[in-house]
Amino acid sequence: MKGAKGLAILTVVKAGAVVAYKFGTGLVIARRSDGSWSAPSAICSIGLGWGAQVNSYGIIFFSYLNFGFLILLVCVLFNK
């Protein structure tokens, strides 16, 4: 945690049969240059899958962001 540039925490739920839907929400925070942490920013993830499947699950992702550009990438990809 000491070298982390940021953290992303995302809770995702997926359910479906033949067609599956996935939705998740979470937060991302970034370490500032002075070592303090930024205010959290909300992120969202959605997805759709199809094929031979019958499933449902819930999972929590905890991502250690080691590079500054990863924080920007997470914010851009999930905040559409």
Image: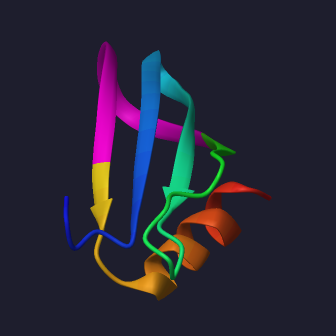
- The colour scheme applied to this rendered structure is rainbow
Query: Picture coordinates of residue 13 (x, y %)?
Result: 45, 20
Write the start and end of the magenta stretch as one range.
Answer: 46-62
Instruction: Tell me: residue 23, above or below residue 71.
Output: above
Instruction: Tell me: residue 45, above or below residue 54.
Output: below
Quarter of image, res 66: bottom left
Residue with the most extreme front position: 34
- Residue placed most toward the observer, 53 or 23: 23
The quarter in which the N terminus is drawn is: bottom left
The quarter in which the C terminus is drawn is: bottom right
Residue 17 in view in this figure: no
Instruction: Tell me: residue 26, above or below residue 35.
Output: above
Q: Residue at x 53, y 30 (%)?
A: 22
- Residue placed most toward the observer, 1 or 46: 1
Instruction: Tell me: residue 15, above or below residue 78.
Output: above
Q: Which residue is drawn at 36% across and 84% down?
A: 67
Query: Picture coordinates of residue 24 (x, y %)?
Result: 55, 31
Residue 60 magenta-highlighted: yes
- Residue placed most toward the observer, 30 or 43: 30
